[in-house]
Amino acid sequence: MTAVLELRRVSKVYGSGPTEVHALREVDLEVGGSELVAVMGPSGSGKSTLLTIAGSLEEPTGGEVLVGGSALSGMTRNQRARLRRRWIGYVFQDFNLLAGLTAVENAALPLELDGVGQRAARTTGLAALEELGVADRAARYPDELSGGERQRVAIARAVVGDRRLLLADEPTGALDSVNGEGVMRLLRAACKRGLAGVVVTHDAQLASWADRVVFLRDGRVVDQTARPPGAESLLTRGPNP
Amino acid sequence: MSVRHALLALLSEGPKYGLQLRQEFEARTGEVWPLNVGQVYTTLQRLERDGLAESDDPEGDGPQKGFRITAAGDRELAQWLRTPPEATSPPRDELVIKVLVATRMPGVDVHELIQVHRRHLVELMQQYTYLKAEAPEHDVGLALVVDAELFRLEAVVRWLDAADARLVQLPAALPAAAPAVAPRPARRVGVRR
């Protein structure tokens, strides 16, 4: 099966000469449909750069990024923009909702930008809000929503329509741990429905919601967890694991 | 964890049989802390001996023997709930010792060693999170037990992250392999026998 996202020896260098910074060094990463991968690393390890390159918001200086089997480097600017609108959903730490739009207008925005008629886009947007349990907030503006509700709307916008790839950068932001867990449950559920997900974080609790955790250090993938978590057991580990 | 007080807590709801106590204990801790039957009966015998619980048949034995809490047991339970648990660090934290030792061993990449432990801990956290994710949302008991383990493991990962960063920033500040004058240990936290 083709990976939804594939990074092949991806490098990113900012600046040149003595001020050169190697943000990513020959990173390989494959993420399949229905898989949630967490990329964990300290500040400055290249996590956010990896995400913006995977999401085609930035170009690598070396290597290749493939989304759905197609190389981004072989696409025109317009093709890449269309791919971003149709296939890729982003969730940011600070939600990035547009203040002048209601929850449903925010959720439907990527579809409208892609040329879907307003009525159809809003119907699909509302369905996404419903899936995330905030359909009753559809007509509210972001400043009328709680932090948890705003993040749900942001996730709805990221999964609306027929998205294949979900990219999240520290998606629980400043939410408390129970609300943060709620966000991770939603991202996990979206991936179980078929999306490929990548979440970058420095937080081990958030990362532990993923099927696989990849460790980044100084722009390199240095390690990853061995196997997806399963029911096998902690329960047989003895009384005091 | 105090099995003794957990059993007293279950008995405070009303009289129960030994086997029933074991099942309820496991169910309420999300089956994360299994108990064996022997442990339950030994604890019940001690509670009876100490006057904190009494049985309906002091001479009898076996799974049909019922127990109830006494007034002294109620007082003991109330006091235990409010007594702060032992929060000092364990006499020796094995991981801290390993990292300290590694910083002084020639040929050992401390960062790689830290990563080995970090990965192991994150894998364990994934297993716990999986339990929580797959459990019904109303299973608060399991969520509480799993959260406790997750926060404990997360604290260790954060310590590893901090150690990793410190060793990058201050590699020269590592303790010398053979100090000319052995420093008198002023602080013995974590290295007591």
Image (spheres, grey):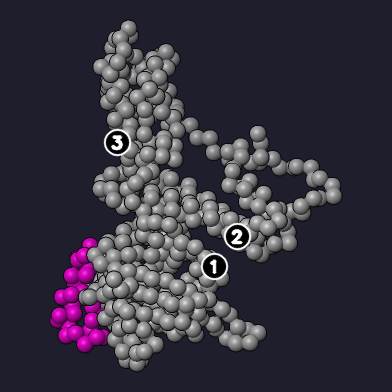
The image quadrant of residue B43 is top left
Quadrant showing the N terminus of chain A: bottom left
Quick one: B116 or A17, which is closer to the camera? Answer: B116
**Label 1 lies in what chain?**
A
Between tags 3 and 1, which lies in front?
A: 1
Residue A234 appears in the rendering? yes
Few, some or many residues within 10 Å of mark 3 (<14, 14–19, 20+): some
| Marks 3 and 2 close (CB-CB < 8 Å) | no
On screen, A152 above or below B49?
Answer: below
Query: What residue does disc 2 label?
Result: B111
Residue A170 appears in the rendering? no
Real-space Cα distance between discs 2 and 1?
10 Å
Q: From the viewer's perspective, is A6 left or right of B175?
A: left
Percent x, y of residue A80: 33, 87
Q: Secondary structure at mark 1?
A: strand
Few, some or many residues within 10 Å of mark 2 (<14, 14–19, 20+): some
Q: Secondary structure at mark 3?
A: helix
Q: Residue at 33% across / 51% down in the picture?
A: A230
Q: Is residue A97 magenta?
A: no
**Label 3 lies in what chain?**
B
Percent x, y of residue B39: 39, 24
Q: Which residues are magenta?
A: A107-136
Q: Secondary structure at mark 2?
A: helix
- Say which mark, if any, is on residue A217: 1
| Marks 2 and 1 close (CB-CB < 8 Å) | yes
Q: From the viewer's perspective, is A112 left or right of B122?
A: left
Q: Earlier in the sequence, mark 3 or mark 2?
A: 3
Query: What residue does disc 3 label?
Result: B27
